[in-house]
Image (cartoon, helix red, strand yellow):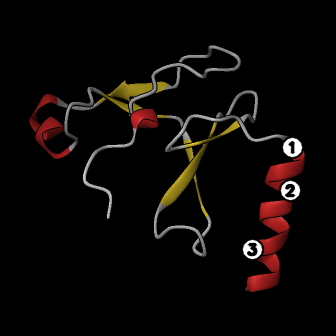
């Protein structure tokens, strides 16, 4: 069981294209529900239920780069396609 926040959950810019991933500010009266975050995010969360019950990978909506939420390692297009194919077979 993971007890700490993954290192790559507080990303404000894409590590590949450097686009700003912050969206509009979270209203001050709601920030208590979002931890230390001050803005909503444009990040796309990707789940593979056979790996983890929740988001395992992040994807940039601009350059489509996918990286591991836990390690920050960028997935190659081949690795990502293989995972998607495996998930489709499972469902």
Q: Which residue sits at x=19%, y=39%?
A: 35
Q: Which residue sits at x=49%, y=44%?
A: 70
Secondary element at tag 1: helix
Question: Spatial distance from mark 2 to mark 1, Cα to Cα?
Answer: 6 Å
Side of 75 relative to 42 (left or right)? right
Residue 56 appears in which quarter of the rendering?
A: bottom right
Q: Which quadrant of the rendered structure holds the N terminus? A: bottom left
Identify whether 74 is placed above or below 83: above
Image spot of residue 88 (x, y percent): 80, 77
- Return the residue at label 2: 81
Side of 23 relative to 32 (left or right)? right
- Mark 3, other Cα within 10 Å: few <14 / some 14–19 / many ≥20: some
Q: Which residue sits at x=75%, y=84%?
A: 90
- Return the residue at label 1: 77
Image spot of residue 26 (x, y percent): 26, 32
Q: Residue 87: which disc?
A: 3
Image spot of residue 83 (x, y percent): 77, 62
Secondary element at tag 3: helix
Identify whether 17 is placed above or below 40: above
Residue 46 appears in which quarter of the rendering?
A: bottom right
Q: Are marks 2 and 1 in contact (CB under 8 Å)?
A: yes
Q: Counting residues from the N terminus, which is met first, the one under dot 2 or under dot 3?
A: 2
- Mark 2, other Cα within 10 Å: few <14 / some 14–19 / many ≥20: few
């Amino acid at each position: 069981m993971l007890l700490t926040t993954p290192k790559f959950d507080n990303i404000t810019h894409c590590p590949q294209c450097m686009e700003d991933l912050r969206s509009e500010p979270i209203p001050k009266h709601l920030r208590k529900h979002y931890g230390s975050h001050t803005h909503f995010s444009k990040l796309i969360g990707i789940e593979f239920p056979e790996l983890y019950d929740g988001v395992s990978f992040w994807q940039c909506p601009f350059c489509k780069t996918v990286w591991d939420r836990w390690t920050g390692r960028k997935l190659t297009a081949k690795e990502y396609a293989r995972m998607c194919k495996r998930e489709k077979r499972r469902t």
